[in-house]
Image: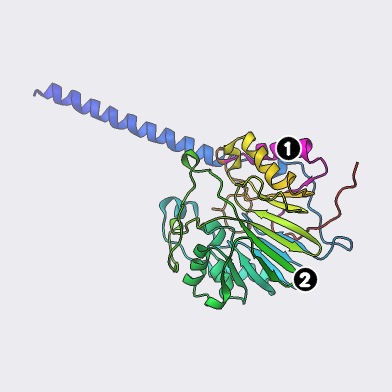
Amino acid sequence: MGRGTINTWLRRARLAVLGACAVLVLIAAILVWLWRDRPSVDNVAWPSPPVPGENTGTVTATWLGVTTLLFDDGETQILIDGFFSRPSLFDVLLDRPVDNDAPMVNYALDEFRMRQLAAIIPVHSHYDHAMDVGAVARRSSASVLGSESSANVARGAGVIEDQVVVVSPGEAYEFGNFRVRLLPSGHAPVGWRGSILFPGTIDAPLEMPQPVSAFREGGSYTVVIEHPEGTTIIQGSAAFREGQLDDIDADVVMLGVGGVGTLGKEYVGKYWQSLVTSTGAHAVYPIHFDDFTKPFGEIVPIPRFLGDFEETAGWLEALRDQWDKDTRLYVPKFGEPIALYEPPLPAT
C-alpha cells in the first residue's frame, strides 16, 4: 500500500472520528436542553390550599415533596412514604451505592415536629418512596406498614420486628383516631413500552448503602385514611383499578401525577374518573410532579419530556369541569400544613 493511500485512510479516519464526536456533542446538547426544559408551577393558576383555622377542623396534611405526606390531628401523626435523602442525578444514572442522609433525616423530623408518629406507610418500595422509612422508624416508635418488600427495607435499617407490619390488603389498621386501609393498586406504566422501572420484590433485609436499583417496586397500594373529620385517598403512582373505589366516599384525593403526561389524555381521564369521580372527592392535590433528584425542599417540576406538569394540570382542569364541577384543585406547597377537611362548595 502506497504512502498516498495510507494518508487517504488516515484522513478518512480522522474525519470519521470528528464526525462521531460532533454527533455525540449534539446528542449531549439535546439531552441537556431536554433536561433543562421544565414547566413552571407558577403557571398553574389554582388557588392556594386552605390553611388551618378556626373552622377547618384539626386534621392537617403537610406535603414534603414527591409523595411524602405528614398527616396530623394534633394527637397522632401518620407519614406516607419517607424520602428525605436525595441521591443525585448521577447517583441514579450510574446506579452508585447510596446511603441514608442522617443529618437530613434528623432535620426533617425536627423541622416538621414529627414527635407523635404512629405509622410510616410507603405506597411502594422504590427508593423515592421508601428509602428513609427505616431511618425514620429507628428514630421513633412508629410502625412501618406496607408490603413485605417495604418490611425488608425497614429490617435492613435495623428496625425491630415489633415495629414492622406486613399488611393484609383491605384490612383496617387504627392509629389514634385514624383508620388506614391499603388497597392493592399498581405502578404507572411509564417505563419503556409500558413497563415499570425496577420491578420485582425485595426478598431479604436491605442493608444500606445500596444502589437505587435495589429498591424494587414490591407491590403498590392505594392508601385510604379515614378520620372522624373526613377521608383522604393517596394514590402515589398514577395507576388505578377500575371500580375498586366505587364503594368508598372520600373528601380529598392526593393524586400522583409523576409521568402521567406521557400516558396521554385518555389515560388521565380514566385515572381521574376512577379516583375522583367515583369517590365524590371535593378537593384534589397533585403530588409526585417534582424532580426527586433535587435536594430535599427544592421543588422543581420534572422536565417536560418526562411529563409536562402544566399540560397535565390543564387536563385535570378540563376533567374537573366536565365531570366534577364542585371539586377544587390545589397545588400543595412544600412544608406548609393544609387544612384537609374544609366544607365542600355549596350545591348549585
Please name the residue shown 46% across and 58% down the image: 201
Q: Are marks 1 and 2 in contact (CB under 8 Å)?
A: no
Question: Is residue 112 visible in this depiction of the protein?
Answer: no
How many numbered marks, from 0 up? 2
Q: Secondary structure at mark 2?
A: loop
Q: In which quadrant of the rendered view does residue 8 lie?
A: top left
Q: In the rendering, at what x and y percent does residue 306 appear?
A: 55, 41
Give the label on residue 74, or none. Answer: 2
Find out whether residue 319 is within the magenta segment.
Answer: yes
Q: Which residue is mark 1?
A: 319
Find out whether residue 82 is within the magenta segment.
Answer: no
Position of 332 with respect to 146 (left or right) is right
Q: In the rendering, at what x and y percent does residue 324 appear?
A: 79, 41
Quarter of the N terminus within the rendering: top left
Position of 322 with respect to 148 (left or right) is right
Q: Residues within 10 Å of mark 2 (few under 14, many from 20)?
A: few
Real-space CA distance between mark 1 and mark 2, rounded to the nearest whole angstrom? 35 Å
